[in-house]
Image (cartoon, helix red, strand yellow):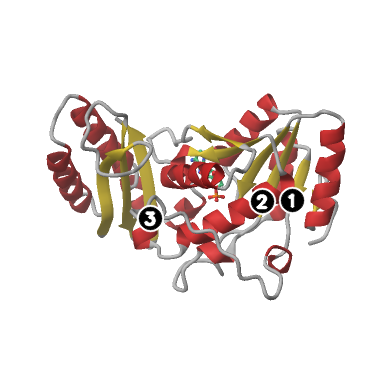
Amino acid sequence: MTGALPLDTVRTVADLRDRVRDWRKAGLRIGLVPTMGALHAGHVELVKRAVAGCDRTVVTLFVNPAQFGPSEDYAVYPRDEVRDAALVAAEGAGLLFAPGVEEVYPEGHSTKVHVGGLGDVLEGEFRPGFFTGVATVVTKLLLQSLPDEAFFGEKDYQQLQVIKKLIRDLDIPVTATGVPTVREADGLALSSRNAYLTAEERVQAPILHGTLAQVAEQVGRGVDPRMQEEWARGQLARAGFRQVDYVTVRDASTLEEAADASRPARVLAAAWLGKARLIDNVAV
Ligand code: AMP
C-alpha cells in the first residue's frame, strides 16, 4: 500500500475502539457497514443508508478467509483498497477499518460462532463452513466497534437472517438493518463475483432474477410452490446454467419450507454460470 488514503484508515482493533469511544462520548450515533471490498453500487447503497441514518459511519474492508472453502476463490478475490477508500470517502463515511488477517485471527484463535438450523440449510448446505465463517467475523466486527446500527444487503438474504439471529441469540446490542438489492438495469444483482462472467454469460445471467420474479408472482397468485420450483429449475437449465444448487420458496424469516401461505415468503436460488456461482432472491 502506497499513497495517502482519502479518509482515515485504521488497521487495529485498539485504534478502531479509540475512535468509536470518542464518538460515543460525544453522543454520536454510529453506523457499521461490513464488506469484503471490491466495492460496487450495492455496497455504496449500504454506505448511503448508514450515512443518512447515523452521525458517523465505519466501513470495514476485510476479505475473510474463514468464510471461503478450500476450493473457493479466496486467493483471487478482487482487492483494491485505494479505489474502495475513495468510494467510501465520497459518500461521507468517517472511518475505514481494514485489518490484516493476523489482527482478526491472531495465532491461537479458536472460537467460532455457529448459527444452528438457519445457518445449516441452503447456502450452509452447499458451502459447508461458510456461515460459521461469516457469523464469527460479523460477531467480532460488531463487538469490536459496537455500533448502534449495522447495515447488510438483502442480496445475501440468508446471511442477513443469520446475522439477525446471532444478534438476538447472543444479546448483542446492535440493530441489523437490511437494504434492498441493487441491480443492473437488466435485473442482474450487483456482485463482486459478476467479474467472473464472460461476455456471453453476462447476457444470460439476468435470467436468474427474471425466473425468480416469475416464481414469486405465480406463488403470490396461489400457484403451488413445488411446481414453480420444478419449472424454475428447468428454465435455468435451458438458459445455460450448468448447475442449479437450489431454487426454493421459503418462509421469509426462518427459511423453512413455506407451508403456511399466510406468512411472508421468499424465493431463493443459487446457480452456476460458467465459473461464477450466482445467488439471488426476491420477495413473494
Ligand atoms: P460482500 O463484500 O460481498 O461481503 O458484501 C458486503 C455487504 O454488501 C453485504 O451486506 C452484502 O449483502 C451487501 N451487498 C452486496 N451486493 C449487494 C447488492 N447488489 N445490493 C445490496 N447489497 C449488496
Q: CA distance from mark 3 to mark 1?
A: 27 Å
Q: CA distance from mark 2 to mark 3?
A: 22 Å
Which amino acid is tagged 2? Leu
Label 2 or label 3, whichever lies nearer to me, is 2
* Residue 271 x %, y %: 31, 54
Residue 29 location (% of width, % of height): 74, 30
The residue singled out by tag 2 in the image is: 141
- Of pointers 1 and 2, the one earlier in the residue sequence: 1
* Amino acid found under the numbered disc labelled 3: Glu
Residue 198 placed where, x, y %?
40, 56
| Within-10-Å neighbours for mark 1: few <14, some 14–19, many 20+ | many
Q: Is residue 39 above or below residue 73?
A: above
Q: Is residue 284 left or right of residue 30?
A: left
Give the numbered dot on residue 123. 3
Callout 3: SS = helix
| Structural crowding at the residue carrying mark 2, measured as other residues with C-alpha within 10 Å and reported as few (<14), some (14–19) or many (≥20) | many
Residue 97, numbered circle:
1
Alpha carbon of mark 1 to alpha carbon of mark 2: how far? 10 Å
